Image: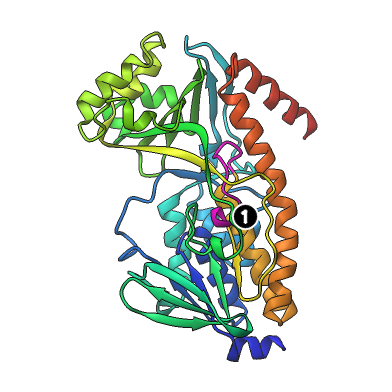
Amino acid sequence: MTIEQVKEEQRIAIVGAGPGGLTLARILQQHGVKTVVYEREPGPHSRQQGGSLDIHHDSGQMALREAGLFEQFEALARYEGEDFRLLDKTGKVYIDEFAESQGQRPEIDRGTLRELLLNSLDPDIIQWGHNLVQAIPMENGRHELHFENGHVDTVHLVVAADGAFSRIRPLLTDSVPAYSGLSMVELYLDNAAIDHPEIAAFNRRGKMFALADHKGIVGQLNGDGRICVYLAFQIEQEWLDTCGIPFDQPEEAKRQLLKHFDDWDESLQNYIRSADGPMIPRRIYMLPVGLKWTHKPGVTLIGDAAHLMSPFAGEGVNLAMLDAMELALSIVQHGDLDKAVEAYEMKMYDYSSKSAEESDANLKLIFSDDAAAKLTDLMNQYYEQQ
């Protein structure tokens, strides 16, 4: 089958309108291949999109170049967001980096990136309010997709870009995400430069990591002027349910959270004390490192659906976009959808397993004893190799 036949005859559905799914749709659109993107959210602004992302030159940026969006990305990216501070709980500074004007991992808010990708697509590609209930295999590799709203679609290829708890992954593997040992509470400091100038000056333009006692406080300046704060705990899976902290009552929750950091420097406690508005508790999950599956016609996985890992290699969104690029180019180059998917999967297994190993090792190091000193040594080794 030629690429022209794929364009005319083959129906490709992407489940999930995150950065991975949208990048895939965009690159295929660039090559004249039509897709449909099904997203369970009712619209593009129905929920908060989360914090800031660092987009890597050898993955996410490559995908944006292929998508024809790199110049627009550069105009939005914050190279100063690569500032990085590393401390221990006493406030001792181990690393204090000021970003160069043109680094390799500039920051962009997740919502801004999504908007860039959405605006680049034909409007009729995305079907909002379509929550996938089931994907049923049929003959010749086709799948029948059933949605909660009653819609049914039959497609030649379904691509799971539906995240950690993918509804499509069980078609390919029995592997399920396992608790990583880490739980986090997400807080925000709104309008930081005006309302929290001391914390803004302390945090500076990028990320602040404070690590000790198998815990962490992470501050991340976003492009909208907020500081996103992550309180991280190496703790049993049930803790968020059993700790008794009322996360829906922010003031009382902050009071109780401060007890977990009662011997930390006040400059770090202030990230908790000054937080505004709601907070989001979440557990961090991961798929087995190096996960592979037996190839099946008509279905594949990208992003967290394929290789969910902890956020401590900074690779999640970058790998999702790299997956999207590799799959799109494979479809264009092969013409035959089945061969294209198989070639993509073999390539993806190789690079994603390396990132998953790095992420797992970083998670263990960052929440070990003397974490700030160990992370400093690791980063110094990295810089020496560059």
- Residue type, mark 1 in image: Gln
- Image height check: is 285 above or below 39? above
Which is more toward the observer, 197 or 367?
Answer: 367
> Image quadrant of residue 364?
top right
Spot occupied by residue 190 in the image (x, y as percentages of width and height): 29, 36
**Residue 203 placed where, x, y %?**
44, 26
- From the image, tell me which residue sits under label 1: 61
Magenta part of the chain: 303-314
The residue at 41%/11% (across/down) is 265
x%, y% of residue 369? Answer: 59, 15
Identity of the residue furthest to the front in this view: 174
The C terminus - image quarter: top right
In the image, taking residue 63 as reference, residue 266 lies left or right, namely: left
What residue sits 72% from the left and 88% below the top? 2
Which residue is drawn at the image coordinates 59% and 83% (left, top)? 32
Residue at the spot 68% in from the left edge and 37% down from the top edge: 358
